[in-house]
Amino acid sequence: MILAFLSDFGLKDPYVGIVKAVMLGINPALQIVDISHQIAPQNVMEGSFVLGSAFREFPIGTTFLNVVDPGVGSQRIGLLAVTEHYTFLAPDNGLLSMVFRYSPKVTCFSIENSQYFRHPVSNTFHGRDIFAPVAAHLTRGVAPHSFGPSCRSPVRFQWPEPIVKDQYIEGEVIYIDGFGNLVLNVSADLLRHRRPIRKQFRINIKGMELSLLNTYSDVARGETAALIGSYGYLEVAVNQGSAAEVLAAGVGVPVVIR
Amino acid sequence: MILAFLSDFGLKDPYVGIVKAVMLGINPALQIVDISHQIAPQNVMEGSFVLGSAFREFPIGTTFLNVVDPGVGSQRIGLLAVTEHYTFLAPDNGLLSMVFRYSPKVTCFSIENSQYFRHPVSNTFHGRDIFAPVAAHLTRGVAPHSFGPSCRSPVRFQWPEPIVKDQYIEGEVIYIDGFGNLVLNVSADLLRHRRPIRKQFRINIKGMELSLLNTYSDVARGETAALIGSYGYLEVAVNQGSAAEVLAAGVGVPVVIR
Amino acid sequence: MILAFLSDFGLKDPYVGIVKAVMLGINPALQIVDISHQIAPQNVMEGSFVLGSAFREFPIGTTFLNVVDPGVGSQRIGLLAVTEHYTFLAPDNGLLSMVFRYSPKVTCFSIENSQYFRHPVSNTFHGRDIFAPVAAHLTRGVAPHSFGPSCRSPVRFQWPEPIVKDQYIEGEVIYIDGFGNLVLNVSADLLRHRRPIRKQFRINIKGMELSLLNTYSDVARGETAALIGSYGYLEVAVNQGSAAEVLAAGVGVPVVIR
């Protein structure tokens, strides 16, 4: 039984190990796979993007534990979301937005049944006290509705959508990966349906004009390229370097594709 | 069989993987859970605090391998400590101080029986050559006394204790977590027994006076708060920011609670 | 069945988790051990050194998945290398150079049989689309020759060899570990065969002259030492500090041993 785990806990503190310890104490047969624990602290949007990019690669039946939780201890509820193939746990703060976007059928429950919690429940570490034990009991076969009532309208935020015109597309940077590649909100599908010959695209960002290439090594070391990246979106990259540094570009920087 | 692993090896070098490889070569059934490998290099006190905060969350029967070892290759002995619920391996340099503090009954052995070592034993990597194979053999059922003679007085250092007066408590910062939260040597229990209404506490640090709140989001983004943190100690935190940076505060900074 | 995994993916992005998800979808019984995912981006030489230092510690039968791949999407082939004790997957770019150096008998195959790939195959993430599924099928018992034809001359680069004279050895820094220790291309074996009393060696680097010591704590805190490190090579280290910082030394800095 695979349990995939994403958080902003970082790897210095014992928080990740503690959450795993609590889960393994309840279900010793769990096989835990880390997605990331280096989501920028409390950055729900970044966590949502990383989770949304990863979850469909996991085997059917995987349970996903997700904790990026700036509102821990407040009134926000804990969410249990069941899709056709997977189950997700997360604070109800938008962290599952990308999951909802790619999952046609979702049933949500509000995690309220304290019988499955670790006690006493702290105000600062629901990953350990609520989400971990609930995830572990869930993987042992406890039915989702046992954890609480249905939840009709979980929080989901809107991703900035590209503006699509006849002559151009206006997009923006939505994520910067660990290599410094700039991921844009322009999907491979959007480009594919637009023109048969994708090499004709011209990408404008921060005064530079780039062609759409096939892979990083199509340009010389240190040169900037635009290509369809591993996330399935248009990316601006520097071959063997960081586009974020070279272009001094962050999330929200506008891009025009002609 | 769970083996929890803490070190200051970092994650760039293959040291963590090598130690795991040695253990799995002896006991392939081990389930290894990382506590942290980003303890500040050779910082035994930090390692002791992180271990002390994590170990009680693990299932009974867990074996803990701990390597923060500035004296590797010197005359310091290797320690095997058996408590009521757990077993610990560590250099005898104070790394188990917090474990001893929370474990009423401890039996210690000096790791000396080279029959269980990996040979040749280096002067620089006892994690691989001594602790890993001993841990793996231990989890396969070799009795603790097989590894060496009893050890009567393992090294333990004193944590700075808060000064508790009628009118105030003087504490200090003892740990900074990965979010930049300042953890103080003032436990939730100490405060709980002191006054029934904890909101009345006033916390003074670096010229700021803070109230004791329930959780991070009780203050606005960027504001400083004092609260009982996940470690079970009083913490000074900045909502969605780093208190260590905002207050320019490090380990040892004094705090007064009235 | 142990699968050891090395890459330059870093730990912020979900790439490591995605590769594991693909493998566990094909072979759920895999026990995955991380060697490192913090190889400097696209630094094949560093990856080769770290892998070369680690692989012989793993149990016989281990499969190694290695992805440091600046040429992803270009014409470079994917390599499957079978040695007496282990199996390796890597792009054919020199990443296995140190493995070849320590493995007398190697049989290589070019990974070409797309029946075992994840489709569609991207131009940017062969770790997920080619290496992961091939590794997983391999560990399920598919014969190496099933993945493609023999490959006669895989890429291997030459490591800078020390110049060995009667009166001195000229070496250089080939790797900097996570503690800032400077690893030299002068092996313990080379020194051992040279003089019976190794304490007589004098090591000159950046205007400093050092004696060869036994371990870090043979010098005071903050002092510089030369010693045989955990990699089995001569290292220059600062006790409880970073030699790379203190000496402002990087890869390629020359060293003379007399």
Image (cartoon, coloured by chain):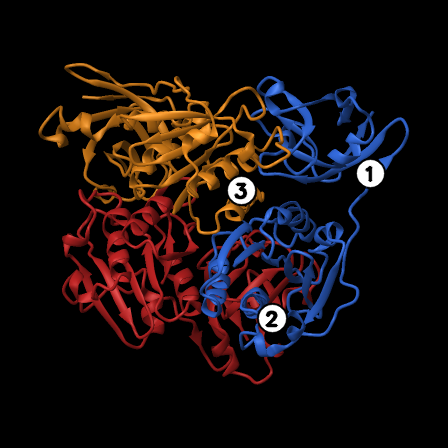
Chain colours: A blue, B red, C orange
Q: Which residue is mark 1?
A: A162
Q: Secondary structure at mark 1?
A: loop
Quadrant in the rendering for residue C4: top left
- Tell me, for residue A123, which label it has, or none: 2
Point out the tag, 1 or 2, that comes first from the N-terminus. 2
The reply to whether the C-beta atoms of the residues labelled 1 and 2 are less than 8 Å apart is: no
The reply to whether residue A253 is visible in this rendering is no
> Measured along the vertical axis of the image, is residue C52 above or below residue B224?
above
- Give the class, few, some or many, for how many residues have Cα within 10 Å of label 1's Cα (few <14, many ≥20): some
Dot 3 and dot 1 within a common chain: no
Q: Position of residue C44 (x, y in %)?
A: 45, 27
Q: Position of residue A104 (x, y in %)?
A: 76, 54
Quadrant in the rendering for residue B152: bottom left
- Tell me, for residue C19, which label it has, or none: 3
Dot 2 and dot 3 within a common chain: no
Closer to the camera: disc 2 or disc 3?
Answer: 3
